[in-house]
Amino acid sequence: MSDESQELGITESKSHKPGEWYAEVVQKAGLADYAPMGGFIVTKPRGYALWESIQDALDGWFKETGVQNTYFPMFIPESYLEREKDIVEGFDPEVAWVTQGGHDELEERLAVRPTSESIIAPFMAEWVRSHRDLPLRLNQWCSVVRWEATETKPFFRTKEFLWQEGHTAHATDAGAWEEVWTRLSQYERVYEDVLAIPVLRGKKPEHDKFPGADTTTTVEALMPDGKSVQGGTSHHLGQSFADAFDITFVDEDEEEQTAYTTSWGLSWRALGALIMTHSDDQGLVLPPTIAPTQVAIVPIWQADTKEKVLDYSETIAEELEDAGLRVELDDRDERNPGFKFNEHELNGVPLRIEIGPNEVDDEEVTLVHRPDTENVVADREGLVETVEENLDAIYDKLYETAEETLEENVREAHSPEEILGTIGKHGGYVKTPWCGDQACEEAIKEKIAAEIVMQPLAEEGGASAGEPVRPDDDATCGVCGDDAEEIAYFAKSY
Amino acid sequence: MSDESQELGITESKSHKPGEWYAEVVQKAGLADYAPMGGFIVTKPRGYALWESIQDALDGWFKETGVQNTYFPMFIPESYLEREKDIVEGFDPEVAWVTQGGHDELEERLAVRPTSESIIAPFMAEWVRSHRDLPLRLNQWCSVVRWEATETKPFFRTKEFLWQEGHTAHATDAGAWEEVWTRLSQYERVYEDVLAIPVLRGKKPEHDKFPGADTTTTVEALMPDGKSVQGGTSHHLGQSFADAFDITFVDEDEEEQTAYTTSWGLSWRALGALIMTHSDDQGLVLPPTIAPTQVAIVPIWQADTKEKVLDYSETIAEELEDAGLRVELDDRDERNPGFKFNEHELNGVPLRIEIGPNEVDDEEVTLVHRPDTENVVADREGLVETVEENLDAIYDKLYETAEETLEENVREAHSPEEILGTIGKHGGYVKTPWCGDQACEEAIKEKIAAEIVMQPLAEEGGASAGEPVRPDDDATCGVCGDDAEEIAYFAKSY
Ligand SMILES: [Zn+2]
Ligand SMILES: [Zn+2]
């Protein structure tokens, strides 16, 4: 048993070796394994269940707001990708190429989709004839491949990853802007209401937009190690893709017009953020919203009390299940309670219910919160409500802790030394006035690998680009000292 | 308008040119388009919604019966595929090969998954240690690629197709058999209860098993053109994959044992069977179980009756929606009722509700069944129940028609001439005693492209292979005249 216990436990420390710790949690909590090819992972049932929860939430919201799911081929002919080069200067994606089919060389190489604009846009052009065909909102849940030669970090950095990609066409610029903000808000909602992670909303600087986009908007989440994660992006593509791929329509006055398009995507990187944000040196921590098992009931018996403890536990399990909670009654004979506690902690079960003979006699149970081991003795009577309250309390704790981390880690700086020093010492975000020149970002990036991850927006117009937050009139760029008309958030990022 | 109407209608005949007719229905009903690369299709929203309905049904049943979803990489190293060759003689799948990543040649070619046994089995071997880890039931919903150079037929024959593939390991042969039958029954259920298509259950002949399998079981559906569709297969893999990939476990007596494995899959070919079975020269026909829109309400007004007709129609639409029905109120101004009728017929909406001023005055509605244009005038009072009854009646009609076709098209034959003549004249299945020699199948196949698609089973043991149906003691092979101990169903197939 001692061998197995050791194998079960997390050996690395989140604060000292966050990278190693993360890899260990992912594997030991049964979320993913490394595939034989570098850069690929195998998503195990417990990890995939988390992805399914994110899918369920987002897919429902998408459908409520007019999105239709589709499936486009996973291969894109090279000539189709090339066509994008007219609008996307220097876009040379690192793609995987299929060059052989069966025993034959293909006449034209096929890219495994790195993203699908170049194959979806031509079909949108076919399908859109009249203003009545707009807005057209398509989405697909699929995997994409980007052949980047970086170190693999499950869910954060893998050559193949799962995501959804939405692609829409609109009659007006205002319609496209509404779309951009609708999707960004849904991404924010999935982080804040499902994953218990507060995010910052904003736009990417001009030089860091999605290739071909007019504007890239983003939600950014701060990880406990001080780095920012780009949690999801929603792009206003203006008319550039529509021009390149002839997405035009006849308007109400029988005039031909060019459409406006958007695209937006959220990947399983959200799982990386989830694991990284809440978990600890005992293993995975999950908010009850997404945990496959919300409550683990661990009965504690001796031979002479086994029957009454188990009977009592079973009625409780049933009652909670009937109320719609996801419950596991851990009545395994071959494991002792201590082993079970450790295992459920490792796997991130938010609430544990301990039931021994005393609990049975007193018609009580003991509830233990996963995140902080807070103990509550509760009456058997009204237990469903008590459990629901405790699950809510656990969610709130996780969210509040993450929110405090975020709030404490947005700092201002007004000189290159201050920017470098602050990020070097604390990590997190450094907010500074910025002249808008990419060279100023480069100067910081070279020294400390931090970049501008986000620029805040004062007012997101429901149907317009919204107004960026402006610094004071006499503000000067935190890097070069020139006049500054923008605000930039510097951070290291995943 | 006349141009558009023509574009809308189906021009080919199902009975005279089933292939062309099928292709036209698929495109004009908005299910799929052809992709730029031969052999690939784009699945449009209306087609994908049908696939989602099949997924929802099957995925729910899988989860109720212990299956966990996973995601394995879409690429498989060539050496992993090679490893299968030990057990699978002559298995040389026609796969698409990735040979370049970014700008570099890969050291080892990667196959785009044609099926995932060879990448899943090694991980099963890792994950299974003890009898307590069994049964292990994994499934993934994904796309696979098979580089076959045949003519493209959307959903029936495409180089890339969507499917689910289940892979399980069990401690005992009996456990594996239970699994095989459980999945085959779920496939049967999705055809019979969701798609309104009766199927035949049985096993494939020895020489036509899945490579490496001990037994391949199948559900077969008869298409109106007389060909059989393999609707889903469930394979008992015995211990061959477990031997080859070392899927072993320690049993209760601390002895090392080899596991038994199964695999089972159902692809979007089910959509092909759905479209082909029920649709007609007016377009798509769908059973209400799977139709994205179950009821189309078409109000018929003049300027002076518009308001009252629309008001009445809206309350009806609301009432039906509140009852959980999928309803479209087609109140478009720019289309006349005739156009709308045609469009909803083309798109396969099972039930149309026509509402004119007379219906409003009489507190009635007119219901029209899509499959046979049967008309019913029904009271406004109690309409939810009436609509539900009519939807059930439509389902029953579709199922019964398909069942009659199936029953009428299983014929016996006892000589090669009779087999060839019967299939040549009627299509369908020809049932004949068979000696078990593949050469006898070849003799038929050479002449008429029909093969043994299924062998019936008398008793499927819940936890065993079951007994094949035996012919009479003195039966002789319908092809060669030798003693026959088996029954074979010959048919042409998709
Ligand atoms: Zn500057
Ligand atoms: Zn014979």
Image: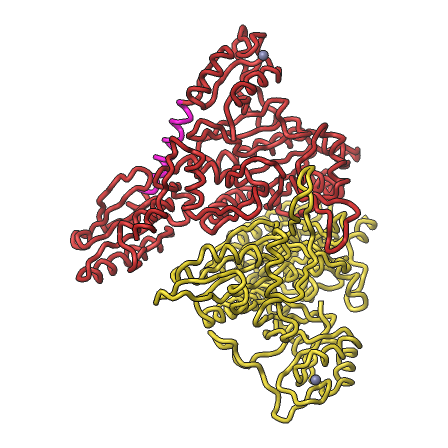
Chain colours: A yellow, B red
Residue A96: x and y in percent read 69, 52
Write down the quadrant of residue A210 in the picture: bottom right
Q: Is residue B397 magenta?
A: yes
Q: Which quadrant is the C terminus of chain A positioned in?
A: bottom right
Q: Is residue B466 above or below residue B249?
A: above
User: Residue placed farthest to the right in the image?
Assistant: A3
| Ligand 1's quadrant | bottom right
A223 left or right of B301 in image: right
Q: Main secondary structure of the magenta part?
A: helix
Nearer the observer, A321 or A196 = A196
Q: What range is drawn magenta here? A: B390-408
Looking at the image, can residue B20 be seen?
Answer: yes
Residue B65: x and y in percent read 57, 41
| Residue in the image at 73% along x and 64% along y | A280
Q: Is residue B361 above or below residue B349?
A: below
| Residue in the image at 66% along x and 61% along y | A269
Q: Is residue A349 magenta?
A: no
Residue A60: x and y in percent read 49, 58
Nearer the observer, A447 or B131 = A447
User: Residue placed farthest to the bottom in the image?
Assistant: A474
